[in-house]
Image: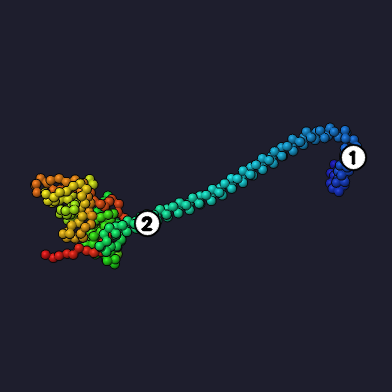
């Protein structure tokens, strides 16, 4: 047994190759001169090999299709990333443009307000703090003494009177609006200039109006008449729009009338204001 195993191990690969080559040559010769002899072998081989070849071919097509799908998915992912980046860039650009439009509209509003009262020197300021909620009746702006703003400077917004500066510091000021409960403005109604006292009141502003009191009983007042600051007002410059009359009624004393005034300014949303640097001349009596 040991001798047989040793003999097998001693067979040289060279001889094995020669034997196999001779067998192949013999099969080729037989196939060429005696084709019918190897016909059964070819049939068996065809039965076994052909399905195997077809399976390998189908597998190759499947792998190729899957590789193409994976390639398409990768390409789609790359395109999606590029599109996402483009969308982000467009959204950022849109936000920037919208901010620029808002800023442009603010500048236009300030320019319009400046042109509306050309006789007064003015400077624009921005609200940065509010002392109350719901109404802008007491707030701070980002300009002060360094910008020529002093206590008593009138403040404008929208198309008319917003309030007055009550405190001022180096680079900021405090403003009290005409709707504040502590505010009072002497005004004139209509083209005839009937004197009235416009009283600040957050309570009436909740109903959408301020009260103009102490109007002469003979004054001819109609709905829609404009109310402006009076020339005899102690702290407010002349001719600034306060609002418009919405209704008027006789008082119970039969000596005066009272009117409801809708202010020009929207006191629920104030961002930018215009401060008149000129101040009303004060007189000591």
Q: In this orientation, which residue lies closer to the viewer: 68 or 208?
A: 208
Q: In what quadrant of the picture does the N terminus appear? A: top right
Q: Position of residue 31 (x, y in %)?
A: 88, 37
Residue at 13%, 48% in the rendered image: 257
Q: Is residue 47 visible?
A: yes
204 left or right of 63 in image: left
Secondary structure under tag 2 reads: helix
Question: In the rendered image, which residue does mark 1 sit on?
Answer: 29
Q: Which mark is residue 104?
A: 2
Q: Quadrant of residue 171?
A: bottom left
Mark 1 and mark 2: span between their CA atoms?
97 Å
Q: Position of residue 225 (x, y in %)?
A: 20, 50
Residue at 22%, 50% in the rendered image: 244
Q: Is residue 32 above or below residue 204?
A: above
181 left or right of 81 in image: left
Residue at 30%, 52% in the rendered image: 269
| N-term mark: 1 or 2 | 1
Q: Residue furthest right?
A: 33
For the residues carrying marks 1 and 2, which lies nearer the camera in this image?
Answer: 2
Q: Is residue 285 above or below residue 19?
A: below
134 left or right of 82 in image: left
Q: Position of residue 127 (x, y in %)?
A: 30, 57
Secondary structure under tag 1 reads: helix
Q: Position of residue 272 (x, y in %)?
A: 31, 57
Q: Quadrant of residue 58?
A: top right
Badge 2, how many Cα within 10 Å: few under 14, some, many 20+?
few
Q: Is residue 49 above or below residue 229?
A: above
């Amino acid at each position: 047994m040991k001798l047989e195993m040793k003999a097998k191990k001693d067979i040289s690969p060279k001889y094995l190759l020669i034997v196999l080559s001779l067998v192949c040559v013999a099969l080729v010769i037989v196939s060429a001169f005696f084709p019918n002899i190897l016909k059964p072998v070819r049939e068996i081989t065809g039965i076994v090999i052909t399905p195997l070849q077809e399976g390998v071919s189908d597998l190759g097509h499947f792998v190729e299709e899957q590789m193409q799908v994976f390639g398409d998915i990768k390409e789609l992912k790359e395109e999606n990333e590029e599109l996402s980046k483009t969308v982000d860039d467009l959204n950022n650009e849109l936000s920037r443009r919208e901010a620029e439009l808002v800023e442009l509209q603010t500048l236009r509003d300030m320019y319009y307000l400046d042109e509306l009262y050309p006789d007064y020197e003015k400077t624009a300021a921005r609200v940065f703090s509010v002392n109350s909620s719901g109404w802008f009746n007491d707030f701070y702006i980002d300009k002060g003494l360094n910008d020529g703003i002093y206590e008593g400077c009138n403040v404008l917004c929208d198309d008319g009177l917003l309030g007055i500066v009550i405190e001022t510091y180096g680079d900021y000021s405090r403003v009290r609006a005409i709707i504040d409960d502590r505010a009072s403005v002497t005004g004139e109604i209509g083209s005839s200039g009937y004197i009235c006292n416009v009283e600040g009141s957050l309570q009436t502003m909740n109903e959408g109006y301020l009260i103009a009191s102490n109007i002469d009983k003979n004054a001819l007042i109609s709905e829609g008449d404009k109310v402006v600051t009076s020339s005899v007002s102690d702290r407010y410059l002349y001719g600034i729009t306060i609002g418009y009359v919405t209704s008027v009624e006789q008082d119970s004393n039969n000596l005066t009338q009272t009117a409801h005034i809708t202010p020009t300014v929207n006191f629920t949303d104030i961002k930018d204001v215009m401060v008149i640097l000129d101040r009303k001349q004060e007189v000591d009596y």
